[in-house]
Amino acid sequence: MYLGFHKKVNKKVALKIYFKDKMKDLSRKKSVRREIKLMKRLNHPNIAKLYDAIETEQQVILVLEYVGGGSTHGFLKSKPNKQMHEDDAKKIYG
């Protein structure tokens, strides 16, 4: 993930970049397409919004709403057994 600035929405954004040379597997390409399709449909206050998806010759770039405070992955790494307690999940995703 990278930090960027989206001029259209005048906000900081998170840039999730997939490098095509690392997506040689057909199932990986399908997975990225599926992620984009689902993110376009999602509208939840606790899930970062997808502003744009840009495809270049070498990359697929997802322009996402910037959310400070770290990642879910980082949070889970700090937990015993790498699992979130159900009460915490309800607060975040409920």
Image (tube, rainbow, N blue to C red):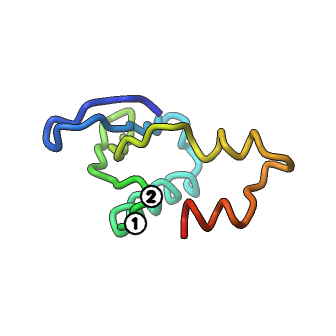
57 or 15, which is in the foreground? 15
In percent of width and height, residue 31 lies at 53, 58
Determine which quarter of the picture holds residue 13. Answer: top left
Q: In the figure, is residue 17 to the left or right of 28?
A: left
Tell me: residue 35, above or below residue 15: below
What is the number of the mark on residue 53? none
The residue located at (34%, 46%) in the rendering is 65
- Determine whether the residue tagged by mark 2 lies in a helix, strand or loop: loop
- Per the model, the C-alpha gap separating discs 1 and 2 is 5 Å
In percent of width and height, residue 26 lies at 55, 54
Q: Label 2: which residue?
A: 47
Q: Label 1: which residue?
A: 44
User: Mark 1 touching mark 2, by CB under 8 A?
Assistant: yes
The residue located at (64%, 63%) in the rendering is 89
Q: In the figure, is residue 6 to the left or right of 68?
A: left
- Determine whether the residue tagged by mark 1 lies in a helix, strand or loop: loop
Q: Residue furthest left?
A: 8
